[in-house]
Image (tube, helix red, strand yellow):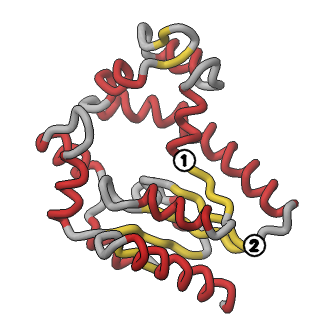
């Protein structure tokens, strides 16, 4: 079974790209969704996170906005949060992989936003990077609710530059040329990996 690592900086269309793989019947593990589950209603990380960051638990779940305010500009706090969440997400990803193997999947996609930054590329057979020109990326991100240019630039500082991600990728999905173009690229990626 081939493991395809999917990544891309904020606003690059990674979520849409993941959906295109799903539409082709390729199972996708969504790391962000795993974190949502862990921090959501009665999630496995709720009590541990509340213990480390008192006051962020509201009605049996973590208030992500409150938590974000505590960790975003504080590297030490962010590291503590990652030390709680990353092993839990890795365990969920392992279970996902085992299930896919049992189901005789020939390939799966693991959608990991900080794939390179956290050194997960070694766990993947192929790397796919969703990408678009900077101006398009910026426009997409600034359309999000509650997003400012300053916050966008702060997020970018924590992410590997797009050109470096592109350099390290086995495949690049250009997400600025329309849905059909991106879908065709995804189809080509799947066909190429199946032939390999």
Question: Which residue corresponds to mark 1?
Answer: 31
Residue 44 sits in quarter: top right
Q: Which mark is residue 55?
A: none
Q: Residue at x 62, y 58 (%)?
A: 28
Asked which secondary structure carries label 1, the reply is: helix
Viewer-proximal residue among 82 and 13: 13
Viewer-proximal residue among 43 and 79: 43
Name the spot of residue 156 as percent of width and height, x first.
23, 52
Query: Local crowd at mark 2 within 10 Å, few (<14), some, or many (≥20)?
Result: few
Name the spot of residue 33 as percent of width and height, x first.
55, 41
C-alpha distance separating marks 2 and 1: 19 Å
Q: Earlier in the sequence, mark 2 or mark 1?
A: 2
In the image, is 91 to the left or to the right of 99? left
Q: Residue at x 29, y 32 (%)?
A: 72
Q: Residue at x 68, y 85 (%)?
A: 194
Q: What residue occupies the far right of the structure in this picture?
A: 102
Residue 7 sits in quarter: bottom left
Q: Which mark is residue 1?
A: 2
**Image quarter in which the C terminus is found:** bottom right
């Amino acid at each position: 079974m081939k493991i395809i690592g999917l990544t891309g900086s904020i606003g690059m269309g990674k979520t849409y790209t993941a959906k295109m793989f799903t539409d082709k019947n390729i199972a996708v593990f969504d790391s962000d969704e795993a974190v949502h589950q862990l921090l959501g209603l009665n999630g496995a990380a709720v009590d541990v996170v509340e213990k480390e960051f008192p006051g962020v638990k509201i009605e049996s779940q973590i208030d992500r906005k409150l938590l974000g305010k505590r960790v975003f500009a504080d590297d030490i706090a962010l590291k503590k949060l990652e030390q709680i969440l990353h092993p839990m997400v890795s365990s969920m990803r392992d279970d996902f992989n085992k299930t896919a193997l049992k189901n005789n999947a020939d390939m799966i996609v693991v959608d990991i936003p900080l794939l390179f930054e956290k050194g997960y590329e070694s766990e993947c057979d192929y790397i796919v990077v969703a990408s678009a020109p900077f101006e398009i990326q910026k426009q997409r991100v600034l359309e999000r609710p509650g997003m400012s240019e300053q916050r966008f630039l702060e997020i970018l500082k924590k992410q590997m530059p797009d050109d470096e991600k592109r350099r390290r990728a086995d495949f690049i999905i250009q997400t600025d040329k329309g849905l059909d173009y991106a879908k065709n690229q995804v189809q080509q990626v799947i066909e190429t990996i199946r032939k390999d």
